[in-house]
Amino acid sequence: MNVAGVDEAGRGPLAGPVTVAAVVLPKALPDVLLALDDSKKLSEKKRLALVEPIKEHALAWSLVHVPVEKIDQINIFQATMLGMRQSVDQLDIQLENVLIDGNKIPENLAYPAEAIVGGDGLVPAISAASIIAKSARDALMLRLSERYPEYGFAQHKGYGTKAHMAALEQYGPSPVHRKSFAPVRDMIQGGLF
């Protein structure tokens, strides 16, 4: 009975991809994975300390970054559902069930699925997916911060903080900004950029 946990990171930011992970854990968790929890409840240090043990002990895991262009094309909800489908499809293991954090299940999943609100704090496999997705997205945003230092992605990971909004107003949107998201779209439509 292999069960995959699925979660995403980065639905709300104004820049960068939405990142989805799927993880299949063994039934008997090793001690090192007993600290699994919702990635938002863990410090960055604790999250990063769990990434390698998750990958090492998982029966299978996958990671998908759905790019800004796709988010702008099909909207953030559909992009998240697409990432969830792709992450499950990339697992190289037969599944009995898929447990997804939240209240929506992507259409056309290859396996039976259940949505669990708050699942990232309740189901170890979803917690593991949450940690993998958040850590991978944060690392990607750090790399984007080197390419576009004026926006401060290293600090806010693309979320609409006061500093990020000020940078957007000063420099306009970068190629990695979500042009379909209201603050960025409004700047473009208002003729500011």
Image (cartoon, grey):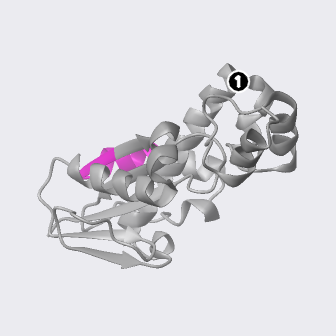
| Vertical arrangement, residue 147 with respect to residue 166, above or below | above
- Percent position of residue 147, x then y: 66, 20
Q: Quadrant of the C terminus?
A: top right
Image position of 65 (left or right of 48): left
Query: For this rendering, which residue is in front, 40 or 107?
Result: 107
Residue at the farthest left position:
94
Q: Would you say residue 60 sits in the magenta stretch?
A: yes
The quadrant where residue 99 appears: bottom left
| Range drawn in magenta | 51-62
Which quadrant of the rendered structure holds the N terminus?
bottom left
Q: Is residue 191 above or below residue 103?
A: above
| 108 horizontally vs 47: left or right | left
Q: Helix, strand or loop at disc 1?
A: loop
Q: Which residue is mark 1?
A: 148
Rendered position, 42 above or below 145: below
Instruction: Give 28 or 120, whichever is nearer the viewer.
Output: 120
Residue 163 appears at what percent x and percent y? Answer: 86, 42
Q: Report whether residue 128 is seen.
A: yes
Viewer-side residue, 18 vs 57 = 18
- Place of residue 36 in the rendered image (x, y in percent of width and height, measured from the top left): 48, 63
| Residue 164 in which image quadrant | top right
**Residue positioned most to the top:** 147
Q: Residue at x 45, y 74 (%)?
A: 119
Q: Is residue 18 visible?
A: no
Residue 184 located left or right of residue 96: right
For label 1, count other residues whose C-alpha is less than 10 Å away and answer few (under 14), some (14-19) or many (20+): some
Residue type pointed to by label 1: Tyr
> Is 64 a magenta residue?
no
Residue at image location 81% in from the left, 50% down from the top: 161
Vertical position of residue 107 compared to residue 117: above or below: above
Q: Where does residue 176 sit, x and y in percent of width and height?
A: 60, 33
